[in-house]
Image: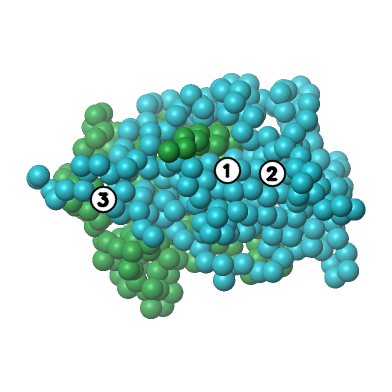
Chain colours: A cyan, B green
Amino acid sequence: MTAYGKGGFIARDWTRQPPARTPAYKTSVTRSPERAKISLQSTLSEDTGPRFGHDLLGPLDNDLLQNFAAPGETAIGQRIIVHGRVLDETGRAVPGALIEVWQANAGGRYRHKKEGYLAPLDPNFGGCGRMITDETGAYHFRTVKPGPYPWPNGGNDWRPAHIHFSVFGQSFAQRMITQMYFEGDPLIWRCPIVATIPDRAAIEGLIAPLDMENTIPMDARAYRFDIVLRGRRASYFENRPEGM
Amino acid sequence: MTKLHESASQTAGPYVHIGCVPNFCGISGVYAQDLGAQMVNENTLGDRISIIGTVFDGTGNALKDAMVEIWQADTNGIYASGDPDPNFSGWGRKAGDDETGIWRFDTIKPGPVPHRDGHMMAPHITFWVVARGINIGLHTRMYFPEEEVANADDPVLARIEHRNRVSTLIATRESDGMYQFNIHLQGPQETVFFDV
């Protein structure tokens, strides 16, 4: 399916997205554009986007318990399954969407050379995974629940447990990076990065509830996280040759 | 029609490499190759070009943890979701160097693509920039300095009211096939970003 015959994107709702400059998240202060963005009705350059085939994926790409572990080993921590659907703003499923995830290990430590937290690395946990949504927009992966960790921002700031998500829809205009949080975590409402989002309901949309129905008994708890990408207007009166 | 709200964006953070370019940051053995690392092969049609650049913050310092993605048409102006050159991916992804912040794309010069009304746009490459401290990914475009006539007739560049800012979207040519395109997040040279 191509997007060529459709209308442009529904205008982004900036009351639900973080502004560029959010002083309580200090790094944003010098990395935030100050001039107004130029509004641009999308063209082919934004309506199209890279597509990824299932042949890209290896069998362990969506299994963070195993994809970095030595043979016979598994990552240490609380075993969880994260699953959900990718939809657009009109409620349609987005099939074929590439999702990439990354996270800290169960102790709150990332496998990264610029990471200095004293919690130990897990030799059997790399922290990355990826998947492509099926025809209903559904995805799932298995991992350990990441730990919270301190970061240098305020004098005593801790990130709530979270998993980073990068999502490609069908158009480059839909490109998104966000973070998933876990139901019940008291650090969520103390976090300056979470608080960059100006709307409480929009924050709640990033908090995955525990999903007992899909929890595997004696094995792994499930969390459900649905992702909504931008949607397109209908193209009433728009598909006309130039000049008409 | 169900009306849902777009999920809220959050910063890519300092460890975006783990998920998006794991081999770059030393996590090997999970994915064979980082996605977007290679855009062309020996059979790709079109003029080979390289683009190097740096993302700068408002103090003039280079970001060393930015990730940049580009999306472009093939040499005939066809995007990879149409019927394009099968030897060209159209999409690239690079992280800035740990020490210098410099990134580099090896690609081809895109052909022109029509705007919604059929009017041709000047050849350009779409950029998307994320980093720690950037709360929502930034969309911009790179145009080519040798396309003066096409750039002057480009309907997107024409949308920019402050004409002295147009130059922030035009790369500089360093040598044959080698362009530099720096992105300034803030300050007097702030790059034009788009609300698509």
- Label for residue A13? none
Q: Amino acid at mark 3?
A: Pro
Q: Are marks 3 and 1 on the same chain?
A: no
Labels 1 and 2 touching (C-beta < 8 A) = no
- State which chain disc 2 sits on: A
- State which chain disc 1 sits on: A
C-alpha separation, residue under disc 1 versus residue under disc 2 = 10 Å
Left or right, residue A35 beside residue B112:
right
Q: Are marks 1 and 2 on the same chain?
A: yes
Can you identify the residue that label 1 sits on? A227
Q: Nearer the viewer, mark 3 or mark 2?
A: 2
Measuring from the top left, give residue B22's x and y in whole percent.
65, 58
- Label for residue A224? 2
Q: Is residue A114 visible?
A: no
User: Element type at marker 1?
Assistant: strand
Left or right, residue A83 beside residue A239:
right
Can you identify the residue that label 3 sits on? B145
Q: Which residue is painted at 41% across and 78% down in the image?
A: B42
C-alpha separation, residue under disc 3 versus residue under disc 1 = 39 Å
User: Element type at marker 3?
Assistant: loop
Q: Amino acid at mark 1?
A: Ile
Whether residue B96 is situated above or below residue B33 in the rendered picture: above
Q: Which residue is painted at 42% across and 33% down in the image?
A: A12
- State which chain disc 3 sits on: B
Q: Which residue is painted at 57% across and 59% down in the image?
A: A134
